[in-house]
Amino acid sequence: MAALETESEVIAVTGYAAVRQAFNDVLDLCVVKLTQADRRFAWEVLDLGGLDEDDTAAIEMLSDTALFSRRDPLRARRAIDRIAGKLPVKRDPLKSAIAARLPAAIFSIFRVIGRHKDGGVHALDLLDRQRPIHIMDHALAQQVQVIGEVLIAGRFVDLGPWYVGFGIVVPLRKSESLAIMLALSASDGGPDEIEEKRHDLHELIYQSHLMGEDLVMRAVEPMISAIAMGIDMEEDFDAAMKSLAPVFPSRRTGGQADNKNANDR
């Protein structure tokens, strides 16, 4: 714990501008260390058959996916876990501190609610019980000052005094944010299962963004498919209609109710 406090102090006294530059340098080193297999895996995950080599956003999303996606969800080992600890930054306390924290970066959806008095913005992590965090990002601060609160998806890492982002910020509509929250919460596993699903969330959002696909429908499709499968497993149609009663509480379902309505007319 003492070591982490020392790292936080190093970062705090250095100042954001120098920390941002050091962060970019460390992240660039991580990208350089990616293997062809890492890049090919990310290419397949995002299905980027027609990638424009001049599309900077696509290249950044591809690199982020190569670093943080899991080839084997059961083992949960990622390229970033292999790379971060072997970077040639041991003699630089600031870069070493940043490298040590990179694997713990989180990808989530955030409600950016206003400027922070110490710079950057106040944000709520919508996939972690609306946990408040302080993000140091001048562009986001300028944006919320002009247009008010915004919803975004992105990867951020806790550096101690504040969080910093990986340079990829995807704006979200309210419907997209709520669809993702609904889809991730539609399980019986509780917070642990939501956290597990969040590991791969960047893949869904990046692919939808790059392909121009409807993120709302992509997010809720597995949930709708599960509901449809449950309905189809019912023994008869009346039972299937009754299974929808919680969804449509004002609708009468079942043969007896329908027959009574028919007799009253």
Image: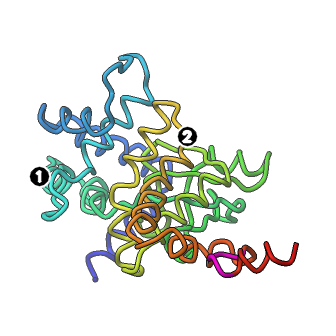
Instruction: Using the image, tell me which numbered label, if any, was put on residue 182.
Output: none
Percent coordinates x, y for residue 110 in the rendering: 57, 60
Name the colour scheme: rainbow
Q: Is residue 189 left or right of residue 251?
A: left
Q: Secondary structure at mark 1?
A: helix
Q: Residue furthest front?
A: 263
Q: Nearer the viewer, residue 1 or 10?
A: 1
Q: Is residue 160 left or right of residue 77?
A: right
Q: Quadrant of the C terminus?
A: bottom right
Residue that mark 1 sits on: 86
Percent coordinates x, y for residue 239 in the rendering: 51, 76
Q: Within 10 Å of the Cα at label 2, are there few (<14), some (14-19), or many (20+) other Cα atoms?
A: few
The question of residue 106 being in magenta is answered with: no
In the image, residue 52 above or below residue 125 = above
Question: Given the image, on which type of amino acid does mark 2 rest?
Answer: Asp
Q: Is residue 91 at least partly visible in the picture?
A: no
Per the picture, the main secondary structure of the magenta-coloured stretch is loop
Is the residue under label 1 in contact with that under label 2 (CB below 8 Å)? no
Q: Nearer the viewer, residue 17 or 85?
A: 85
Residue that mark 2 sits on: 214
Percent coordinates x, y for residue 7 in the rendering: 32, 69
Mark found first going from the N terminus, 2 or 1: 1
In the image, residue 56 above or below residue 251 = above
Q: Is residue 74 left or right of residue 44?
A: left
Q: Secondary structure at mark 2?
A: loop
The alpha-carbon separation of the residues under discs 2 and 1 comes to 39 Å
Question: Given the image, on which type of amino acid does mark 1 rest?
Answer: Lys
Give me the residue at 26% from left, 32% from top: 43
Q: Is residue 248 at least partly visible in the picture?
A: yes
The magenta region covers: 252-256
